Amino acid sequence: MDGLRDLSNDLPNYVVTAFGERLDQHGGEPGFTAVLAYTDRHPVGYAYGNTIEHGGRYWQRTSPASAGRYTERPAVALREIGVPPAWRKTGTALRIHDALLATRDEPYVTLMVNPAAGDGEVHALYKSWGYEDIGPSQPSPASPVLSVMIRAIR
């Protein structure tokens, strides 16, 4: 791995499996785009997302029903974004986020976040990027209740 340690060995097998299953599902959906960030040939983060349509499952799970201005046209769902601990609080995640959105034509980007993640810091970070809360969602019975957030792309 070119001097990098395989971090998947440090994660429980179910975490790696669940990520792979989500990536496989989202990668086959319309408008899938991924961004991988590198420095000196070493990965430092990633993000991916895909297009979601009006009336789709994503919006059906959001309560209360999302405002028509957000759902009348396709939007981008930011499905995953991540940077290793050493790259957090460096602006890297925002640059990756912005690179992903730079190629998109949709008017809005939405994401779901666990409001308790990082003692609320992750939710606050997205707010600082211009996202606003529009309602809760529970994507599956095993999932915690997540906050659905949205912002204009441009």
Image (tube, grey):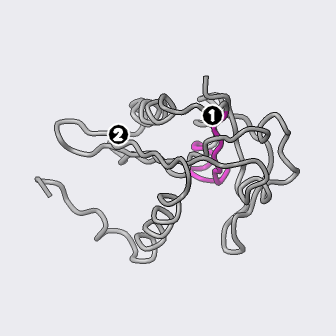
Identity of the residue furthest to the top in this view: 154
Quarter the C terminus occupies:
top right
Q: Residue at x 77, y 37 (%)?
A: 70
Q: Position of residue 10 (x, y in %)?
A: 32, 68
Toward the left, the furthest residue is 2
Q: Is residue 58 magenta?
A: no
Residue annotated with mark 1: 106
Which residue is at the front of the view, 72 or 113? 72
Within 10 Å of the Cα at label 2, are there few (<14), some (14-19), or many (20+) other Cα atoms?
A: few
Q: CA distance from mark 1 to mark 2?
A: 29 Å
Where is 149 relative to 8, above or below? above
Q: Position of residue 17 (x, y in %)?
A: 43, 74
The residue lying toward the viewer, choosing from 36 and 128, is: 36
Residue in the foreground of this view, choosing between 13 and 38: 38
In primary-sequence order, the first of circles 1 and 2 is 2
What is the crowding at mark 1: few (fewer than 14 residues within 10 Å), some, or many (at least 20)? some
Question: Range of the magenta residues?
Answer: 108-122
* Residue 80 on image: x %, y %: 50, 51
Label 2 is placed on what type of residue? Answer: Trp
Depicted 67 relative to depicted 105: above or below: below
| Residue at the outermost right position | 64
SS class of the residue under badge 2?
helix
Q: Would residue 115 be found to the left or right of residue 70 on screen?
A: left
- Marks 2 and 1: in contact by CB < 8 Å? no
Q: How many callouts does the rendering have?
A: 2
Mark 2, residue position: 87
Q: Secondary structure at mark 1?
A: loop
Under mark 1, the amino acid is Glu
Q: Residue at x 49, y 49 (%)?
A: 32
Query: Which quarter of the figure has residue 74?
Result: top right
